[in-house]
Image: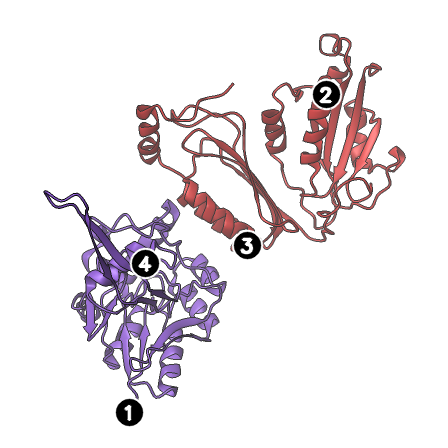
Amino acid sequence: MPLAMSQVWLVLGPPGCGKTSWIRDQLVRHPGPCAYWRLQGPSFENLEQGLDGGIDGAWLNDQIPELQIPAGQPSDLLMDDRLLRDQELLMVVEVQHFQAAISTCPEDIHPQISKQLANLHLKPGRIVNFGVDSYLPNQDTLNFTTLEALDIDLQDSIWDPNSLSSFWFELVNGAYGDVYRAKALVNLPDGRCFFCNWIVSQQGSQFLPLERIEPPHGRPKRLSRLVVQGKALNPTGIRSTIEECLFSDEVLELHQAPLRETNNNLQPTR
Amino acid sequence: MTTTHAVISCLHANLAALEAVLEDIDQQGISTITCLGDLVGYGPQPNEVVQLVRERAIPTCQGCWDEDIIDGLNACECSYPSQLAEKRGHRAHHWTADQLTEENKAFLAGLPMTLRKDQLLFVHGSPNSQHEYLLPDMNAFAALERVETAGVETLFCGHTHQPYIRELSGGSIQVKVQARGTKTPREETMTLPMRRIVNAGSVGEPRHGNTKATYVVHDPISGDINIREVDYDVAKTCQAILDAGLPDVFAWRLRHGFEYAERAEDASHVCER
C-alpha cells in the first residue's frame, strides 16, 4: 500500500500538447523528492503510438538531476523510507492519449491504462487531462485521426550542426511526409546535447540545450534518439538524410581536436 | 530599336524556367541578353539548357558551377555551408558531369570570367571571384570597393539567387596627410559618384520567397532597372528531377521556393585555392 507521504498524478494528453513541459514545471516546484514514469498509451484504430524511447525521461532527468526514474516497480519508490523521510514524494505518470475528450473521473480511465496502473500498484490521486481541464494549455490538442510513427536510434551519433538545422527544417516542413510531431535528443561535436521539439500547431521549433555537457572526446554514451509522428512518412528518405548529417570519426576528430588544444571548449558539467 | 537589355543568371539546368524567361524577354522586344553563368548544377537538364544558350548566342560569363564541372570538385571546397549541402552538391556535381556532352563542357570551359560593356561589368559572383557572394546587406564600403576597383558605374552579378538593386551614393574617401615641418594635417577628400550593384536573381533556382524565375531588365539611357518575376511550370522541372534520379529532396525544395542547398552566409567568402 502507498504511504500517506506520497502522491501520484496521472497526466494524459495527445502528442505534442505540452505534457512534458508542464510536468517539468510541476516537478521543479515540488519541494520534496519526485519521480517520473511513462506508461504505454492506449491503442486507437489508425493511430500508431510513437515510441518515446526515453527522450522525455532523459530530458526531465537533465533538467532535474535528482528526479527518480524507477528501473523496477515504480510503486517501490512510494514506500522507500530513505527517500521519503519527512517529505512528500510526487510521482508523475505520463501517458500519450490521442482522444482528449474523456472525463477526469478515475472510473473513466481507459481500461488499457487502468490495467497498467493496477499491475504497477499505482493509484493516481490526481488526473490531469490535456484537452479537458480548462486550466491547462489547450492550444496543441489536435484531433488526430490517422498517424504513423517512426523511431530512430541515434546512439553514438554526432551531428554537423548546420546539417542538423537543414534536416530539421526539411523534416518539419514536409519534405519526408506530413509530420505532426517530432522530437529528438541530438549530440553536437562540442559536447552539447539538444532537445529538439516540434508540433504542427506550434510556431517554430524548440531547441533546448541540456544542462549536461560532455568533454569533446569522441562520442558520448548518452541517450540520443529521434521520434516522428505523422502521415505518409518516408523513413528511407529520413534515414538517408540523417546519414549525410552525421560526422565520421575522422571528421569528428577534426572538429574536436581544436577544442581540446585551445582549451576553449565548453566545460563538462556534472 | 530598343537599347534595353536583359540580364539573366543562375539557370541551374532548369529548362522550363529558362524557356519561360526567354519568352518573357522576347515579348518585350528585347534582343540583347547577357547571362551571368551557372548554366548547370542541381537541375535535371544541363545539356538542354547549355544548348539553348548556345543556340541563342547569349553572351555568358562563367559561374562557379560551370567552373567546377570543368575543373573538378577541387575548384572550391570551401563554399558549402554544411556537410549535408556538400554531400548533396557532390552528388549533383557527379551526375551533371556524367550527363554533359564533351561539346557542352568545352563551351563552359571557354566562358570568360567577366564581360564588360562601356560602364557596365557583368560577373557571376564578384569581380574578385565567381565564388564570392555580394549579399544585399554586405558592408557598404566593401560593396563600393568591389564596384570602384572594377572601374565601372554598374556591376551586374548573380550567385546569391536573391535579386536586388543597391545604390551606393554619397561615397567618399577622406585622408589626412601630416607633412614634415607642418603643424596642421592637410585633409583631402575624394567624392565618388553613385555606383550600383544589380543582382539578377536566379532563373532556375529562385531564392527570394517564391518559386518564380527572376531576371532584370536595364535601360542604359534612362538608367531604369526592373526586376522581373516569371511564372513557369515548376511541376514539370520537379518531375524531371525525379525522372533523372536526382535526390527527391531537390524537387521538394524547388517546389517550395527553397534553394537546392543552403547558401553560404559569409558575404566576404572568397575561395583561396
Q: At 10% from the left edge and 42% from the top edge, which residue is drawn?
A: B181
Q: Which residue is mark 3?
A: A173
Q: Are marks 3 and 4 on the same chain?
A: no
Compared to residue A219, the image places residue B65 above or below, namely below
Q: Nearer the viewer, mark 4 or mark 2?
A: 4
Confirm whether residue A36 shows in the render. Answer: no
Chain in purple, by letter, is: B
| Spatial separation of the CA atoms under disc 3 and disc 4 | 29 Å
Q: Earlier in the sequence, mark 3 or mark 2?
A: 2
Q: Earlier in the sequence, mark 4 or mark 1?
A: 1
Q: Which mark is residue B134?
A: 4
Residue B241 at x, y = what percent? Answer: 41, 65
> Given the image, what chain letter belongs to the residue carrying mark 3?
A
Please identify which colour was used for chain A in the image: red
Q: Nearer the viewer, mark 3 or mark 1?
A: 1
| Spatial separation of the CA atoms under disc 4 and disc 1 | 33 Å
Residue type for callout 3: Asn
Q: Are marks 2 and 1 on the same chain?
A: no
Q: Which residue is mark 1?
A: B1
Could you tell me if the residues under marks 4 and 2 are in contact, i.e. CB atoms within 8 Å?
A: no
Q: Residue furthest left?
A: B180
Q: At 44% from the left edge and 22% from the top edge, which residue is drawn?
A: A267
Could you tell me if the residues under marks 3 and 4 are in contact, i.e. CB atoms within 8 Å?
A: no
